[in-house]
Amino acid sequence: MTVGGGSVLGIPPSSEGYVLEARGLTKRYGSVIANKEVQFGVRRGEIVALLGENGAGKTTLMNMLFGMTAPDAGSVLIDGGPVRLQSPRDALALGIGMVHQHFMLVPPFTVAENIALGVEPSRRGILDLSDLEAQITALGRRFGIDIDPRALVKDLSVGQQQRVEIIKALYRGARVLILDEPTAVLTPQEADDLFKVLRGLAHEGTGIVFISHKLREVLDVAHRIVVMRRGAVAGEVLPRDATPESLASLMVGRDVLLRVEKAPSVPGNPVIVVRELVVNDDRRVRAVDGVSLSVRTGEIVGVAGVQGNGQTELVEAITGLRATQSGSLHLGERDLTRATVRERTDAGLAHIPEDRQRHGLVLPFTVAQNMILNRYYRLPFSRWMVMQAKAMRDQARDLVGRFDVRPANPEARVGSLSGGNKQKVIIARELSRDVRALVASQPTRGVDVGSVVFIHGALIAARDAGAAVLLVSAELDELLAVSDRILVMFRGRIVGEVEAATATREEIGLLMAGGVGRVIVPATN
Amino acid sequence: MTQAVRARLIGGLIPSLAIVTALLIGGVIIWASGPRIDGPWFGIWFVVEAYQALIEGAFGSRAATIDTVLRMVPYVFTGLAVMVGFRGGMFNIGAEGQLAVGALASAWVGFTVTSLPLVIHLPLVLLTGCLAGAIWGGIAGLLKARTGAHEVITTIMLNYVGGQLAAYLLNGVLRDRSPLNVIAQTPKVAETARLPDLVPGLHSGVILVIGVAVLVWFVLWKTTTGFELRMVGINPDAASYAGVNVVRRMTWAMGVSGMLAGLAGAVQVAGVNYRSTLGFNVGYGFDSIAIALLGRNTVSGVVLSSILFAALRTGATKLQFRTQISTDIISVIQALVLLMIAADQIIRWIYRIGPAQTEADPVAASTAPVADSESGR
Ligand SMILES: Nc1ncnc2c1ncn2[C@@H]1O[C@H](COP(=O)(O)OP(=O)(O)O)[C@@H](O)[C@H]1O
Ligand SMILES: [Mg+2]
C-alpha cells in the first residue's frame, strides 16, 4: 500500500499521464476543513474509485474538479496544465463531465430534449433534434448504452435516467467522467449494468472517477482505489492489494470488523404470522400473490428478490401502509389484518421503512421530534394532549448517545444529518421501545461502512432481545451475513427458502431469477 | 439555541426587506404620479410627505389608531385561518366565503333570538359564526378526503357559492323589512348580541383575537394535535407511517381554518356593523393569504403583518386626501410585498443573502412557505 501522494522532501508527486489532476486542493466551510491539500488524479482509460465515510470530503473534491466549487488553495490541472474552472461550463468545455448524486434532468422532457438543454441545436432558430437523436443512438451503440432518445425521462427507471446523464456528458465530449455515489440509488442488477458501461467507457479511453460506499463493487471494478478520511487522502491502493477489511479500516481510521458476529439463533414461538396474503400495487396489479410466512422470536428472516417482485408491497401490507386484498396477518395471537398503523405500533410492531426520507422522517423537524414521531401521543411525551418538551429532550439525549448519532445534538434538524445518521435516528426510535416484531426494509441502503456495521449490530441485538425480525434487502451479502433463514420472492410469491449459514450467493441468485431451489414452499394452498 | 435565534432573525429578515423594498418602489410610483415640479428635492419631499400622511392616517390620532386596530382584528382571524390550513398542508383560498357565511349565520342568530341574556346570546352568536365557517371550510376538506378534489379549486368555488348565497338571503328571507332600508342587509342584531366596547369606539373583540392567537399558537406548537397537523403538512407519508389518520387531520385543518374565518365574520357583525350587509367585509379573505405568507405562517408573523396591512388600509385615506394619490397605491404596495415574498430570490439577490436551505434539506426547500419556518414562531 502506498500512502497518498508519497511526496519526499517536498518534491511534487509524480503525476504522469493524469488527464485530470488535483494538486494541493483545500476547501474550508466555516470551521470545517472539507478538503485539506488533496492530491488526486485520473488517467486515460482508468477507473478510479473514491472511498470514504460520509463527510470525508469526496463530493467537495469532485465539485472542485468540476468547477462547481472554487478551491481556497491549490490547483486543478488538465493534461498537465493548470486551469481555472469558474463554472461547470468551463469544465465541460475542457472535457470533464459529472453525474451528480441527484440527477439534473427535466422529467417531462424526452431524453433528447434533456441532452439538448444548454446546447440546443437549431435550424434557422427552430429547435431541431433529429440529428441529435441519431447521434444519441450512435453514442449509445458505441458505448453499449441502450437508450431511446424519444422516451420521456419521467417514464425511465433510476438506472436508465443515470444513463441519460452519462450520455449527456459524453455528448458534450467528456474525456473524464465523475460519478458521485452512482450505485447508492441502484439495485444490484442495475449496478452491474452500470459497471458494464463504465468498463466499456474506460476501454474507449475515458477516465472515470466514481464515489462509492460499497467495498465489494469497488474491489471488482476499480483499477485504483483512493481513500479519503476527514478531508485528506488517507491512502491509495490497488484492488489486488486490498481486502474489504483493509479498505474499511483505512476509511474509518481504526480496525473494523466487517464480518457480522452473531450467536446461533434460538427461535421461539411464531410472532409475525402471514397467511395467504394478497396485495395490489399502486396500479391495482397483484403484487403479492398469496404469501405465507412466519417469523419466530429470536430469529431474523431475510427476504431476497430482484427489486419489484412484491417485497415493497409485502412490507407495506404488514406494517399497515397498504390495504390487503385477502389473507391475514397475526402478531402472536392477535389478528392485525385490518388494524391501523397505530394499532400495529401499539401492539409492538416496529418498522424501518425502505424510503427513509419519505416515510421515516420529517426532515424539517428536529432529531428529538423525529425520535418520538410515532410515540408523541403517549406518556411521558404528552399528557392530556400537551407535549412534554422535557421528556422528549431527555429521551433524545439518551438515544443520541446510545445509538451514536452525529452530531449528538437533539435540536439539530434531521434534514441536515448524513444518510447514515438519519437511519440511526430511525433505528433508535424503532428499537428503543418494546418491540415484539421488527420489519426492516433496505436498512443500510446508501449508508457508509461505519453505520452499516452499527445497524447490523442493532438488528442482531434486537433479535437476541427476543424480537422477531423480518429483513428485506437487495444486498445478498447483507442477507447472508445477518439473517438466520432467507426467503426468496419472485413475482409476488415465495419461491424458496434457504438456511443463511449454508446458502451461497449463486443458489439465491438462481431462485431470484425464478429458478428452482432446494426447498419449495407452496405459495398457495 | 443560538441556532434557533439565528434562524428566527433570518426568518424575519426577508419579510422585513420585502416590505422596505415595496415601500421604496411605492415611493418611486408616488413620485412619478405626483405633480411635475422641477428639482429632485421636491420629489423626495413629496414622497416623504405622502408616507407621513399614511402614518398619520393610521396612528396620528386616537381615532385613527382605533380605526387601525378595528381593521386589524379580521385580518388576524383570517390570517390565522389561512395559516392553520397551510400548516396542515391545505391551501385555503376560501376565507372570503367562510367569513361571509360566518357573518350571515351569526347575524341571523343575533336578530332572531331576542330573549337571552348577553352572557349566553353573545357566545351563541360567535359560536354560530364559527360553526358556519367550519362547515364551509369542512366541505372542502371532506371533498378532498372523499374524492381527492383539490382544496384550491373547491374553496374558490365555495367563495362564489357563499357570496351568492349571501346575496340571495340578504335580498330575501334575511333582509331587513323596515321601510327605511334600501339595501341588502339584515336587521340589526339584539343588544345582547353585541360585543361591549372596551373603550368608546373599540369593541372587545380585540381581547378575543389576542386570546385566539395565543390559543392557536398553543395548539399548533404545544399539543399532540398541532404536532400531527404539522407532520401532515410537511410530510403526509411520514405522518401515515407514524400512525396519523392523514385524511382526517387534513379535513380537521380545513374545518378549523374555516372556523377562524367564520369567527372573523361573526366578530365583524357583533362588534362593528351589528348586522350582516352584502359586500361589507369584502377583501379580508383574500388579503389574509398575503398576511399568512408575509407572516411566514407563524402566529407572531400573522399579527405583525395584520397590523401592517391594517395601517396601510387605514392610512390610505389620509394619503389620498393630502397628495391626491389614489388609495390604490396601497394595493400596489401590498402586491409588491407579496410578489417579493413569493419570489424571495428577488430579495436574496438585491440584498445578497444566501440560499434558504442547505441542500441536505430538500423537503423544507420545496415546501418553503409552510415548512421553512418550523423553528420560528
Ligand atoms: N456547502 C457546504 N456548506 C457547509 N459545509 C459543507 C458544504 N459542503 C460540504 N460541507 C462539509 O464539508 C464536509 C465534507 O462534505 P462532503 O464533501 O459532502 O463529504 P462526502 O461527499 O465525502 O460525504 C462535511 O463536513 C460537510 O458538512
Ligand atoms: Mg457526498
Image (tube, rainbow, N blue to C red):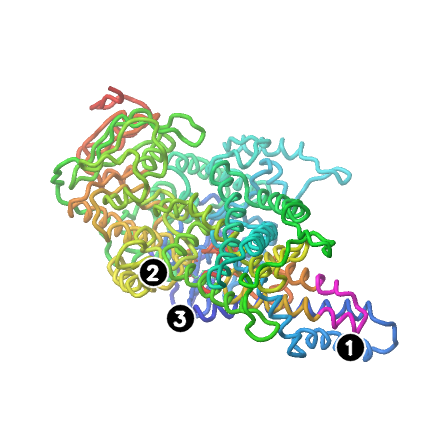
Horizontal side of A337 relative to B22 (left or right) equals left
Which numbered tag is attached to residue A387?
2
Residue A83 visible? The answer is no
Residue kind at label 1, given as amino acid type: Ile
Magenta stretch: includes residue A8: no
Is disc 1 surrounded by few (<14), some (14 to 19) or many (20+) residues within 10 Å?
Answer: some
Residue kind at label 3, given as amino acid type: Met
Picture quarter containing residue B324?
Answer: bottom right
Q: Vertical placement of B93 versus A7: above or below?
A: above
Residue kind at label 2, given as amino acid type: Met
Picture quarter containing residue A321?
Answer: top left
Q: How far, Cα to Cα, is label 3 from label 2?
A: 19 Å
Horizontal side of A305 relative to B330 (left or right) equals left
SS at circle 1 = helix
Looking at the image, do the residues carrying marks 1 and 2 touch, with CB atoms under 8 Å apart?
Answer: no
* Magenta region, residue range: B316-332
Query: Disc 3 or disc 2, which is closer to the eye?
Result: 2
Residue B183 visible? The answer is yes
Picture quarter containing residue A151?
Answer: top right
- Are the residues under marks 3 and 1 on the same chain? yes
Front-lying residue, A281 or B269: B269
Residue topped by disc 3: B1
Residue topped by disc 1: B44
